[in-house]
Amino acid sequence: MATPTIAANAYANLARVLENTAAGKGSEASGQSFASLLKDAVGSVMESGRKSDAQTVAMAAGKANVMDVVTAVADTDVAVSTLVSVRDRVIAAYEDIMKMPI
């Protein structure tokens, strides 16, 4: 379940991504390319998953707090949900473009 802190962090990350995208609007040389932006986003989700896995293994070994594990898993859930939403929007945009008459 998402907490207000997780939601605030997700919002801050989204704002940072949008800021980077808006800064590169004029020329591609000054900002990130779309491919690098996607690579960073997927890398962020993968890193969140790794942290979650590490916390889970640490808890199984008796070295981590349950609250830390729950927080790590919730962070990963929010990251994956965001990534899936972006994927769905990209696919919908692609389908809309393909439906356009020439």
Image: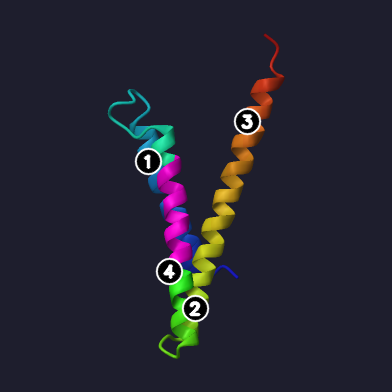
Tally of marks: 4
How far separated are the C-alphas under marks 3 and 2?
37 Å
Residue 56: which numbered mark, if any? 2
Instruction: Tell me which label, 3 or 1, sits earlier in the chain.
Output: 1
Q: Is residue 93 above or below residue 48?
A: above
Secondary element under disc 3, as helix, strand or loop, is helix
Q: Is residue 100 above or below residue 21?
A: above
Residue 93: which numbered mark, if any? 3
The residue segment tinted magenta is 38-51
How far separated are the C-alphas under marks 1 and 2?
34 Å
How far separated are the C-alphas under marks 4 and 3?
32 Å
Instruction: Tell me which label, 4 or 3, sits earlier in the chain.
Output: 4
Instruction: Tell me which label, 1 or 4, sits earlier in the chain.
Output: 1
Secondary element under disc 2, as helix, strand or loop, is helix
Q: Amino acid at mark 3?
A: Ala
Neighbor class of circle 3 (other Cα within 10 Å; few <14, some 14-19, many 20+) is few
Q: Name the residue tied to disc 1.
A: 19
Instruction: Give the number of the mark in front: 3 or 2.
Output: 2
Instruction: Tell me which label, 1 or 2, sits earlier in the chain.
Output: 1
Q: Name the residue tied to disc 4.
A: 51
Residue positioned 46% across, 68% down in the render: 5
Q: Is residue 27 magenta?
A: no
Secondary element under disc 1, as helix, strand or loop, is helix
Q: How is the image coloured?
A: rainbow
Instruction: Tell me which label, 3 or 2, sits earlier in the chain.
Output: 2
